[in-house]
Amino acid sequence: MTATTPASTPEQHIDLTNQTVEPCPLTAAQLDVLNRQIKQWGKELGFAHVGVSDVDLSQHEASLQQWLDNGYHGEMNYMASHGMMRARPHELHPGTLRVICARMDYLPPEAGFASNLTHPNLGYISRYAGGRDYHKMIRQRLKKLGDKITEHCKTLGFDATDFRPFVDSAPILERPLADKAGIGWTGKHSLILHPEAGSWFFLGELLINLPLPLDIPIEEGCNTCVACIKSCPTDAIVAPYVVDARRCISYLTIELQGAIPEEFRPLIGNRIYGCDDCQLVCPVNSKAPLTAESDFHTRQALIQPELIDLFTWSETFFLRQTEGSAIRRIGHKRWLRNIAIALGNAPANPEIIAALEQRKLSDEVDDMVIEHIDWAIAQQQQKAPQETISRKTQRVIRAIQKGLPRDA
Ligand code: B12
Ligand code: SF4
Ligand code: SF4
């Protein structure tokens, strides 16, 4: 899908970052061959797509600053703490001339999106999180890619290759980089998506000091569609390409440490870890490939799990079940907080009230969890017996059944 620009010769190489960098002795032809090799090695390492971008994200600095000024990062202070380094990979890792961007698909087989959302007594876990935590795995593979490049360059007489792998947690704007590297276009939900691959993938980057040929961004393909904006349960996509994280269920259930604001609780439904709705209604995802990594397959205990069962997990059991998974990071208390909300949103049921009351008596809850349990009990008590899922979610379910029949 992507084309590449010809490599500049070392003499011609224009450094947009005003860095003093060692001149790279590799010729344009050698860099071209290396570029093709990198794509091949990337595939062998399990990356579905690898592209190369430069380090110039200056056009994104103003919108990043605006996002932070609006407070859209909420409690994610790390988003504000690195200044504009997020948009300046060469400041994060001096000497960087290119960013090798990689995509790894995570959509598990038998995703069961619609059947999960249809049953409000089941917990919905975002499909990126049902298997092994991706951070370490992708970083290790990127490191291997960097080692291969280093070895290759050594055979050409250049032994000053310098690289650094990043996945997610680094202060770097991964999506604009992936956009520039031709991995996909920026959707109105702000995620990167590709016409053949959809958006069910992680991104990772290798910052490197080689003037590799650049890939060309692919054409934007959202056109007049606004399905993601209209379907977001909490109206978190406040404008095309802009997500107010404070409203996003992913932030509320994963990043937020304390109480979840009451206004959002009924809208969260049965989503107990993350949210996929903006991707579920996206027509581009109809062709998305399944993951090639068995590590990303959903663990048995997390396939269509009953909320009441999950709510009884002790801290020890929770830690055992979530070993090596991203879910472990939120800890047992926030796990209980999220499930309490989903139980409050479930159809009226005396068994649920009993489970909530029982949990309050355990020594594993603190004031924050108890407040959520009390909210859930009140919701249960004031609900008509057949009240269930919101109209918006019903629309999402219909969209999944129609647009993603394999994953419904
Ligand atoms: C903070 C964060 C979040 C926050 C905030 C999300 C957000 N939209 O910013 C929360 C917790 C809400 C979140 C949620 C999710 N996240 Co997240 N998250 C990140 C993280 C760490 C930083 C993102 C960031 O810098 N945001 C700040 C904003 C300002 O930057 P930005 O959205 O990239 O914005 C740029 C563009 O929108 C662009 N822009 C602005 N206007 C315009 C206009 C046009 C026309 C264009 C083309 C561009 C454009 O300029 C902006 C820069 O200022 C990245 C990893 C990373 N280091 O990049 C992962 C990451 C973005 N998340 C990811 C995922 C998978 C998710 C979830 C799907 C998880 C889930 N299922 O629950 C959801 C999706 C929610 C959503 N619709 O975004 C993946 C995305 C992969 C992909 N295919 O794009 C990433 C890249 C992690 C990874 N390494 O794979 N996430
Ligand atoms: S992940 Fe869910 S809450 Fe967040 S923007 Fe997408 S649809 Fe909205
Ligand atoms: S749902 Fe529509 S607007 Fe949103 S990302 Fe997909 S194609 Fe673009």
Image (spheres, helix red, strand yellow):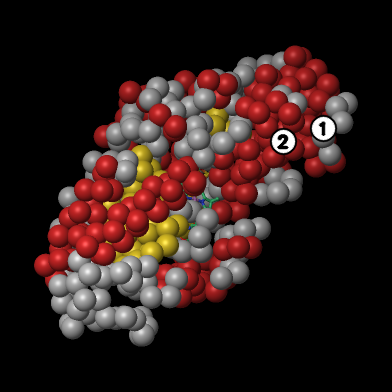
Q: In this rendered view, identify the residue nearer to me: 197 or 294.
A: 294
Percent across and percent down for residue 250 are 56, 44
| Above or below for 6 versus 134 | below
Relative horizontal placement of residue 332, taking residue 297 as reference (left or right): right
Q: What residue type is labelled 2?
A: His
Q: Are marks 1 and 2 in contact (CB under 8 Å)?
A: yes
The relative height of residue 91 versus residue 267 in the rendered view (above or below) is below
Residue for badge 2: 332
Q: Would you say 249 lies left or right of 199 here?
A: right
Q: Within 8 Å of ligand 1, the CB of disc 1?
A: no
Give residue 374's position: percent from left, percent from top.
81, 32
- Looking at the rendered structure, the kind of residue marked 1 is Glu
Q: Which residue is depicted at the point 68% across and 32% down?
A: 319
Q: Quadrant of residue 296?
A: top left
In the rendered image, which quarter contains the C terminus?
top left
The residue that disc 1 covers is 364
Work out how far the residue at label 1 is from the one at label 2, CA to CA, in angstroms: 8 Å
